[in-house]
Each structure stands twice: as C-alpha cells, then as structure tokens.
Image (cartoon, coloured by chain):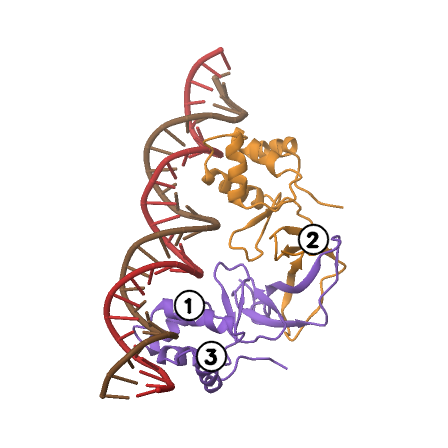
Chain colours: A purple, B orange, C red, D brown
Amino acid sequence: MLSSMRSPEELTVAFRATGLKVTPQRQLLFRLLHDNCTHPTADSLFSEASRQMPGISLRTVYQTLNDLTEMGELQSIDVGSGSARFDPNVSDHHHAVCDECAAVHDVYVNRAPEMRGLEGFAVADAHIVYRGLCAACSGSVKR
Amino acid sequence: MLSSMRSPEELTVAFRATGLKVTPQRQLLFRLLHDNCTHPTADSLFSEASRQMPGISLRTVYQTLNDLTEMGELQSIDVGSGSARFDPNVSDHHHAVCDECAAVHDVYVNRAPEMRGLEGFAVADAHIVYRGLCAACSGSVKR
DNA sequence: ATCCCAATTTGCAACTATTGAAAATTAGCA
DNA sequence: TGCTAATTTTCAATAGTTGCAAATTGGGAT
C-alpha cells in the first residue's frame, strides 16, 4: 500500500544503471532516508549524517536529495514551514501538520474533492495540508 | 459570499480604533489590496506601490501586510512558489495554481475531505492546493 | 493651530534556505 | 593500475523576510 523509496541496495543498483556513482555519502543518505517517516528537512538530515560521517557537506545532502527527487524516489513537500521536507513515501497522499509539535504525518483521503468556482481549470494534482493537533499533543493535558 | 477584506475607508477606521496610525503608505496599500484577486507577493505590491509612491520601502510593505494579516483582513498563503502570496479573500477557500502561467485562483470545495490513516489528529483546518493548467493556458494552442 | 510622543517609516544589516561555480577528489570501467 | 567523468567540498551568491536603530510623523491633548 505504501509506495516507499527503494532500499539502499536497490538504489545502489539504480544509481549505477543511470551512470550515477554510489559514494559513501550517498549510501549514508540512502540509509537515513529508508523507512524514514519523520519528513526530514535537508538540514536535519545533514545533522544526522554529520554524526555518522563528520565532514559531509550540506551541499552534498541537497544534491543527493535533489537527485533522488528527480528520480522519483523521494517527494519534496512544502507545508509552509519555511524549508522543504522530504518524504520517501511517494504514493499519492497528503499531510497533517501539528500546530504544537510541528510533526508532519502522512494522510490519505478517499478521493480528491471536486473544486468549484473555477471553470476550465485542468487539475493535474491536488495536495491537502491539514493543520491541528496530533494525537500526542491533543491527548496530553495541555499547558 | 466572498468575505473580502474591508474597504480602505473601513480599514482607516479600524486602524485608528486599534491605536494604529493611518499613513499614506498604508492607505496606498489598502487601495492596492482592495478587490485584488491576483494573490500578489510582497514584492509585486512593492513594485506597484513604488510606481504611485516612489521611495516607499519594501520593509513598510511587509510590515503592513503582516499587520493586516494579524488583524484577519488578509490571508497569507503559501503555494510553494518561494514567496508568500496575500489574499484579501479571507473566506474559507482553497487555491488552484497554473503550472504554465503561475496564476493563483480561489476555489471552493463542498466540504473538506475526511482524512484516513491517522488516529486522533484534531483537524483545525485544511488547505488544498490544486495544480494544473488554467482555462487560458489549457485552451490556447500550446507553445 | 501647536505640541508632543508613541507609532511608523526607512535604511540596512542579518538571517535562513537554497543554489552556482570552481577546484580537488574519487568511483568504477577499461 | 589509470583515466576520466562524476562527485564532493568550499565558498560565494541569491531570494525572501525579519531585526534594529535613527529619523520622521500621525493625531490626540493643549
């Protein structure tokens, strides 16, 4: 059901097949992104990567994220937080952002709603951003 | 039906009532925004304003846009174009962005779709961004 | 009509997110 | 093992936006 990014091993093959090289930096990022449901920013990935590979550059992180996005292995999403979030779940889905803890969750809808009030617009896709309080934040006794 | 920003005259009263001053810069922006359905950016408003009032500063434009947004007279929307767009239509609505000409249109949906796959998230609001080709761009013989 | 002071405008520096460019390094095939 | 194009790194540059301080000004009080 989830259409996740391919595994580090599969990406290694895919990269080589495309003429792209598989460097230690890229392998690390493949691993950090695999099954990552935190919707990380380039910067949070850079921090995480730096811990395991001191000296890796932020530029390389951006580069690799862009490569993966172009290959369709990653989805770049903008939930209005100022920086792009990257999502290895490339299936057709939407997002819910917690106003309290800023966590981003994947959500699904039965069918994209029909829009009204605009004749002749050919919709290619629709992305919904829900805002509110996540289970953890709304469940706890609020401050 | 449309819940548009109040008129320049009404805003003048509202500003004074709140202890905010009504300057020529602000009056100009009130006018430029009234009934403006182009979803302008701060910068496009600054260009327009500069034509009528050379010397007005971009900082003032940002300031006033933020003030109006805080007062609920304006909605700041992010359609992923890199810069914020401002919408004097403050009713509950959504947006359609043309991939060709980048125009942003207001759209309405019957009801916000229920989301699935996330238990306990208390939705405060939902914003949908549609992408595709607007009537003008999809109708014309493509380049 | 004039004063006065808090609100505003300006100018500019600072900041964040991201990309461009060039030199040094390296993956991976021959 | 060598070669070369791809990659990484470094650093500068860009866009959008905000912070700050000095100069200006709106508008109620006099």
**Quarter of the image where one finds residue B35:** top right
Mark 2 vs mark 1, CA separation in Å: 37 Å
The residue beneath circle 1 is A62
- Closer to the camera in the image, B90 or D2: D2
Q: Chain of mark 3?
A: A
Mark 1 vs mark 3, CA separation in Å: 19 Å
Q: Is residue B92 visible?
A: no
Amino acid type of disc 3?
Thr
Q: Chain of mark 2?
A: B
Amino acid type of disc 1?
Tyr
Secondary structure under the numbered disc 2 in the rendered image = loop
Residue C24: horizontal and vertical position, in percent? Answer: 23, 70
Residue at 54% across, 40% down: B45
> In the drawing, what numbered circle is on residue A18?
3
Q: How dense is the environment of label 3, judged by Cα within 10 Å: few (below 14), some, or many (20 and up)?
A: few
The residue beneath circle 2 is B140
Q: Are marks 2 and 3 in contact (CB under 8 Å)?
A: no
Residue A93: horizontal and vertical position, in percent? Answer: 63, 71
Quarter of the rendering occupied by the C terminus of chain B: bottom right
Residue at 47% across, 61% down: A83
Q: Is residue B132 visible?
A: yes
